[in-house]
Amino acid sequence: MDRMFALVLLSLSAVLTGCSTQLQLSESERIAELDAYWAEVSRCVREGDFAGYKATCHKDGVYVSGAKGQAYPLSEAFKKWEKDFINTKSGKVKGNVEFKFSKRLGDSTTALETGMFCYTNTMPDGTKSKYYVNLEALLVKRGKWLIMMEYQKSKGTEEEWNELSQFKI
């Protein structure tokens, strides 16, 4: 019982002496790291850097398509996406992805990011297509942040995208 009392006092003392600010700073640093992660994903898509993109994913990562009702390893999704990266890198098409989040949960080694992404591609004739997708992403930090699960829940709309003003990456 004395040990429990000491832990309660220590916790209360930390709050009263301002250590809660340290927790906020830690959360701020975590969000900054995650922002950098999503910026790297965007860079890889924009530049057609397939190896860089794969490096943002955990080797045991899972891709989930809500629209198709399927789930399978990200390594299988890579086989479908590689051609798009090659076409972007060669300049045949231009790709871009942006992210916005409505909820960002986690701690120093785990994150659940909820929001949307907007993928834009421009074909050689100048035709542009935009895709809005509702997204949940589960990430783990193993030296660096890696996506464990990319859940593309459903198609989104431009209106939904515009409503998400927070956390744009």
Image (cartoon, rainbow, N blue to C red):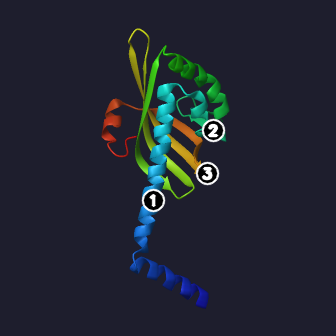
Quadrant for residue 127, please give it: top left
Query: What amino acid type should be assigned to the residue bearing mark 1?
Result: Glu
Mark 1 or 3: the one toward you: 3
- Dot label at residue 62: 2
Mark 3 or 2: the one toward you: 3
Quadrant for residue 115, please give it: top left
Above or below: residue 113 compared with residue 25: above
Q: CA separation, marks 3 and 2?
A: 20 Å
- Dot label at residue 143: 3
Instruction: Tell me whether circle 1 and circle 3 mark residues in contact (CB < 8 Å).
Output: no
- Dot label at residue 27: 1
Mark 3 secondary-structure assignment: loop
- Dot label at residue 166: none
Binning the other alpha carbons within 10 Å of mark 1 as few (below 14), some (14 to 19) or many (20 upward) gives: some
Mark 1 or 2: the one toward you: 1
What residue appears at the point 54 percent right and 38 percent down from the top-left corner? 151
Query: What amino acid type should be assigned to the residue bearing mark 3?
Result: Gly
Binning the other alpha carbons within 10 Å of mark 2 as few (below 14), some (14 to 19) or many (20 upward) gives: many
Quadrant for residue 163, please give it: top left
Q: Nearer the viewer, residue 106 or 39?
A: 39
Horizontal relation, residue 3 to residue 10: left or right: right
Q: Nearer the viewer, residue 25 or 153?
A: 25
Decide if residue 109 is in sight here: yes
Q: Nearer the viewer, residue 11 or 32?
A: 32
Instruction: Tell me whether circle 3 and circle 2 mark residues in contact (CB < 8 Å).
Output: no
Mark 1 secondary-structure assignment: helix
Name the spot of residue 139 as percent of width and height, x first. 56, 47
What residue appears at the point 40 percent right and 8 percent down from the top-left corner? 125
Query: What amino acid type should be assigned to the residue bearing mark 2?
Result: Val
